Image (cartoon, coloured by chain):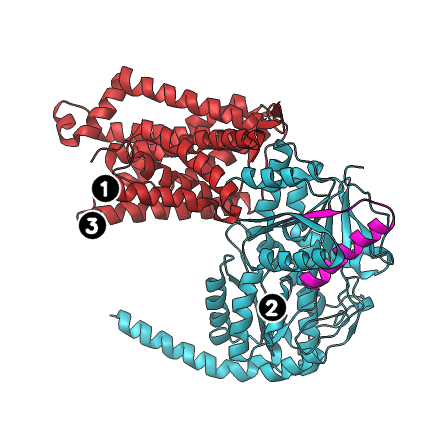
Chain colours: A cyan, B red
């Protein structure tokens, strides 16, 4: 008779043996990377899209593609003897504590060489601290809070822009519109109550003060609220020239619906992407968002300047059944930047990968973004990740700022 | 604060409060009937919203017309949840209270997971309804038609429920079962049948709420969670088992929430509701209308 105890002991032994036997062999033929997103809960769709984006990047690395992107030509990582990258996904449910626990599990049990994630800045904050403790590099794909790179972490890298850069672009744009004779005196801040919203509003409040815009309303709201009526009421009575919302998808949809219900039509809105970068927001309430401007890292009309944009979008669409957006394009790039560094590191050792990431220098033309290049400062932030502003016109986003990237002039006010 | 702004806050709070009441009353009814807190109540709401969305796609009819059908579907779901899950949980020999909690909580997680698997985590939205996007402008006070409609449905549901409970045999059987489960068995009332119908009725009510919400709210596998929390507070505030309590407490919660958001930063707007809840728990633990 086989007893449960025997099975357990035997199983453990087999596991230990396979672990011992496989470890050195595995290092040569695959590199394991941990990917952390919310795969369930209110932001699950972002996680599902992120998975497609990162798998698209992986496909470009592992298969042969004739594209001007790092590691596109040829298969696998030549620097690691042609090794392939294997992804392990973890679901952090948008909860910082679950993010920390999952990061720890990926590092200690799955022995990942690096981590990628996490969308919600609050989660990226705990994951980056965990990665630092274990000496495992964390490539932050799409969290934009400036406080993340201010912690002097050695293993934190962010190829995309952060909210100070994005917000500066917004105010540069407002200044430019003022110069053109538009009357823009006041802004209204509307932001969610986690690190993403709070950091974003701090920057915007500061910039408004420095550049002479009155903050007519400063509304911090509870994320995933059943109703935003009272909040919208406050925005409406403030009646600022520009509304600056910082929201995830649920709140972006509810805000737009409530604004329409209460008859609040701001002259213009400039959003801090996230929920306002999601296709589903436009599928549900896009008709009410005509002329909305969102900051972005990406736009499909960049295909004119970066030929790989269209090809990558086709690959992504085949998986996700939707186009790349501001979030998924950054997730794609994060994986590609990491793979390029892994290849140069020629090792799965955390320190060596860190050194390779720190030495990254990818020209903007080899990305699908409007960036000048990818090169990290000592704080792990890419300072050459030029943001763009996109405007929702008809059924698509059009790049309207800065001028060198613009495809069309901005419609101002939004309902013009 | 201007009179107009005050009127707006009052009206918004009242409209939302009536919808909260409609969401909560089914929960209260089930608790009053058999001392079981249905932790899957929010998921029933979510499924009602998906049912509305699906039926609109299928029939191209307005959600308003489809409301009775959604309520009927939820009635079946509620009765099935009782017969398939809760009935067995109630047979537990030890720790019956905990078993019930785990059973309905497990049901909630199962329904959420199933919804995410079947419907994907994408956000849905019922478009092209008679009510959608229309707003009544009363001299600068804006009342969205979907919410006015929701409030009317809520009041009608409460009226109907009152008639059902006081004028029909089923209502009287429900009331009697609630008073003394043992005694009703002696007079030949089938307890299992009454419970199943009670669960069906509770679910049908939250089904109505789901159909109302689907017109002006996004639909998502997680959408039940934020409303369920408010429903629990509403039920506790009004008194577990009290139908009138659910109505009054729903309105109170809506108003307190609206005014707190004006007085405090909006991110703290639930604070007022929970402060009130705590006060009631200390002063009147059975709730405003509850019996101990």
Chain letter of the residue beneath label 2 in the structure image: A
Q: Residues within 10 Å of mark 2 (few under 14, many from 20)?
A: many
> Please, what secondary structure does the residue beneath circle 3 have?
loop
Q: Residue at x 49, y 29 (%)?
A: B15
Query: Residue B119, image x and y in percent?
Result: 54, 43
Query: Residue B222, image x and y in percent?
Result: 49, 45
Q: Which of the two residues, B6 or B57, is positioned nearer the viewer here?
A: B6
Q: Residues within 10 Å of mark 3 (few under 14, many from 20)?
A: few
Chain letter of the residue beneath label 1 in the structure image: B
Q: Which residue is mark 3?
A: B95
Which quarter of the figure is the N terminus of chain B placed in? Answer: top right
The residues tagged by marks 3 and 1 sit, at their Cα atoms, a distance apart of: 10 Å
> Please, what secondary structure does the residue beneath circle 1 have?
loop
Residue A367 in sight in this render:
yes
Q: Which residues are magenta?
A: A161-189
Q: Which residue is mark 2?
A: A148
Mark 1 and mark 3 in contact (Cβ < 8 Å)?
Answer: no
Mark 1 and mark 2 in contact (Cβ < 8 Å)?
Answer: no
Residue A257 is one of the magenta-drawn residues? no
Q: Which of the two residues, A265 or A118, is positioned nearer the viewer here?
A: A265
Is B285 situated above or below A365?
A: above
**Which sits earlier in the primary sequence, circle 3 or circle 1?**
1
Q: Which residue is mark 1?
A: B90
Q: Is residue A389 left or right of residue B31?
A: right
Q: Is residue B183 left or right of residue A135?
A: left
Q: Residue at x 17, y 31 (%)?
A: B181
């Amino acid at each position: 008779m086989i007893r449960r105890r025997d099975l357990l002991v035997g199983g453990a032994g087999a596991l230990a043996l396979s672990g011992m036997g496989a470890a050195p062999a595995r290092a040569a033929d695959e590199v394991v990377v941990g990917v952390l997103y919310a795969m369930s809960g209110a932001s699950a769709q972002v996680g599902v899209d992120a998975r497609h984006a990162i798998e698209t990047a992986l496909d470009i690395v592992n298969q042969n593609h004739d594209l001007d992107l790092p590691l596109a030509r040829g298969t696998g990582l030549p620097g690691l003897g042609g090794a392939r990258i294997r992804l392990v996904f973890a679901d952090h449910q948008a909860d910082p504590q679950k993010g920390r626990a999952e990061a720890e599990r990926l590092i200690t049990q799955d022995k990942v060489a690096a981590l990628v994630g996490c969308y919600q800045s609050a989660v990226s904050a705990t994951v980056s601290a965990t990665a630092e403790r274990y000496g495992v590099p964390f490539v932050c794909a799409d969290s934009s809070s400036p406080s993340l790179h201010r912690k002097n972490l050695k293993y934190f890298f962010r190829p995309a822009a952060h909210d100070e850069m994005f917000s500066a672009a917004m105010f540069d744009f407002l200044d430019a519109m003022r110069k053109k004779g538009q009357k823009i005196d006041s802004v209204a801040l509307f932001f969610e109550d986690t690190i993403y919203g709070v950091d974003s509003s701090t920057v915007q409040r500061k910039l408004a003060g420095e550049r002479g815009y009155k903050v007519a309303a400063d509304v911090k709201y509870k994320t995933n609220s059943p109703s935003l009526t009272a909040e919208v009421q406050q925005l409406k009575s403030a009646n600022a020239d520009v509304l600056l919302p910082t929201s995830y998808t649920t709140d972006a949809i509810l805000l737009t619906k409530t604004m329409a219900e209460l008859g609040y039509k701001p002259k213009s809105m400039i959003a801090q992407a996230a929920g306002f970068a999601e296709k589903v927001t436009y599928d549900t309430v896009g008709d009410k968002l005509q002329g909305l401007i969102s900051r972005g890292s990406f736009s499909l009309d960049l295909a004119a300047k970066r030929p790989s944009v269209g090809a990558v979008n086709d690959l992504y669409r085949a998986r996700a059944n939707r186009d790349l957006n501001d979030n998924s394009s950054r997730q794609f790039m994060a994986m590609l930047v990491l793979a390029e560094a892994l290849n140069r590191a020629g090792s799965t050792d955390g320190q060596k990968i860190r050194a390779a990431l720190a030495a990254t220098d990818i020209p903007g033309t080899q990305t699908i973004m409007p960036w000048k290049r990818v090169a990290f400062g000592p704080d792990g932030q890419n300072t050459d990740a030029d943001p763009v502003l996109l405007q929702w016109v008809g059924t698509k986003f059009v790049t309207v700022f800065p001028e060198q990237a613009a495809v069309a002039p901005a419609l101002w006010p939004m309902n013009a | 604060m201007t009179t107009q702004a005050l009127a707006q806050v009052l009206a918004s709070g009242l409209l939302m409060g009536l919808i909260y009441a409609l969401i909560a009353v089914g929960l209260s009814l089930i608790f009053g009937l058999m001392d079981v807190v249905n932790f899957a109540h929010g998921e029933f709401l979510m499924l009602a919203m998906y049912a509305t969305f699906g039926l609109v796609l299928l029939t191209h009819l307005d959600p308003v017309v489809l409301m009775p059908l959604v309520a009927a579907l939820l009635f079946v779901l509620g009765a099935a949840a009782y017969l398939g899950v809760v009935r067995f949980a109630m047979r537990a020999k030890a720790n019956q209270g905990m078993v019930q909690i785990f059973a309905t909580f497990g049901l909630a997680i199962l329904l959420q997971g199933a919804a995410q698997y079947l419907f994907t985590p994408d956000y849905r939205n019922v478009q092209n309804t008679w009510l959608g996007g229309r707003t009544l402008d009363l001299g600068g006070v804006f009342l969205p038609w979907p919410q006015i409609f929701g409030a009317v449905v809520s009041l009608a549901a409460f009226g109907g429920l009152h008639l059902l409970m006081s004028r029909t045999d089923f209502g009287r059987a429900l009331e009697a079962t609630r008073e003394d489960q043992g005694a009703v068995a002696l007079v030949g009332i089938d307890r299992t049948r009454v419970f199943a119908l009670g669960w069906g009725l509770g679910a049908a009510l939250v089904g109505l709420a789901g159909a109302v919400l689907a017109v002006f709210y996004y639909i998502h596998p997680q959408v039940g969670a934020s409303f369920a929390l408010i429903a629990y507070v509403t039920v506790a505030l009004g008194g577990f088992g009290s139908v009138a309590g659910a109505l009054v407490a729903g309105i109170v919660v809506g108003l307190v929430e609206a005014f707190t958001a004006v007085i405090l930063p909006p991110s703290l707007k639930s604070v007022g509701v929970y402060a009130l809840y705590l006060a009631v728990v200390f002063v009147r633990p059975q709730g405003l209308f509850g019996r101990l």
